[in-house]
Image: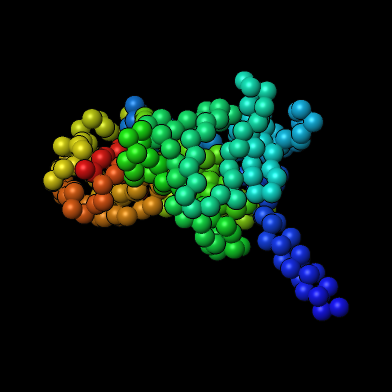
Amino acid sequence: MKYLLLLFILLFSTISYSQFIPTLDEDHSWNVIYWSFWSGGYTNINNFSLLGEETINDKTYKIIYRDNVETSCRLREENGIIYSYEENINDEKIMIDLNLEVGAVLNEDYYCFGGGGGTIWEYHVVEVATEFIADADRKVITLEGFDITGESFGYFEKWIEGIGSTNGLAPFGYNYDFYNMMTCFTENENVSYFNGFNTCEPPILSIESYSKSEIILFPNPITNNSILQFPQEAKIDQIKIYTISGKLIKNEVITTENITLKNVDFSSGLYFYQVFSENKLVKSDKFLVK
């Protein structure tokens, strides 16, 4: 009898452990903001949601909507894995896998969300942990990006159980001339913010705001000291600096027409800065520290 009871407890614990908080629920939505090197700032914000299902090759997929308009993206979820149906191969690819362990290497690509790692050649799983996020204990997998030479690119992102990626519903949000990140995740009208944002829809940079070409960091990359210069008419009063994974590492009030950034204050890698005037975003750009 004791043996049967022990067996039941072990079986129950195994079943419980294998259950994941679902990501693809229709009461979930994701707001994602996009940054473009060519425009020098945030270009647009999209809201992603799910509505309805479609059966393809005898498998049932959720239909993905962008700003309430149906997209061609189809996703399904099973045992902690999110699959993306790829129309070009009439098959599916793994988009997120919460069963991965430290040391796993990913170099798969998918096209549903316009994915692609750009200058990042591989993603390595560097940490698997449990964190309390959005009112629940969730499994979190941290990935680091590496270039074709095997060097770390200074890029990190997290896959979060029941939420998706810190880039939004889809992972791998960095490319050579743009990146995207999630501003907020909504679950049954409860909102959680990510990547240093405190609103789901931050203001988008206006091309006419100021002469952005006059706000410049030189030299870039930073190898010693670099000067970030502001035009007087812009009235810049705040700067924020983020890691490539969206972690805010500097938030400083500005009272001068330039500031100095020193390489000794940063680890090697890619960073982004934002400059503000009277709480309005004036310019976003990236810089490299060597």
- Which residue is at a point 86% across and 78% down the rendered structure image? 1
Left or right of 234? Residue 77 is right
Could you tell me residue 148's position as x and y percent?
36, 33
Does residue 130 lie above or below 59 as drawn?
A: below
In-front residue for pair 226/223: 223
Left or right of 172? Residue 90 is right
Does residue 52 lie above or below 275 as drawn?
A: above
In-front residue for pair 220/192: 220
Does residue 247 lie above or below 108 as drawn?
A: below
Look at the image and tell me whether residue 51 can be seen: yes
Left or right of 186? Residue 34 is left
Q: How is the image coloured?
A: rainbow
Left or right of 144? Residue 262 is left
Look at the image and tell me whether residue 194 can be seen: no
- Which residue is at a point 53% across and 52% down the rendered structure image? 101
In-front residue for pair 283/218: 218
- Which residue is at a point 69% across and 43% down the rendered structure image? 77
Residue 289 falls in image quadrant: top left
Could you tell me residue 263's position as x and y percent?
18, 49
The residue sitting at the left extreme is 225
The residue sitting at the right extreme is 1
Could you tell me residue 21's position as x and y percent?
67, 55
- Which residue is at a point 59% across and 63% down the rendered structure image? 137
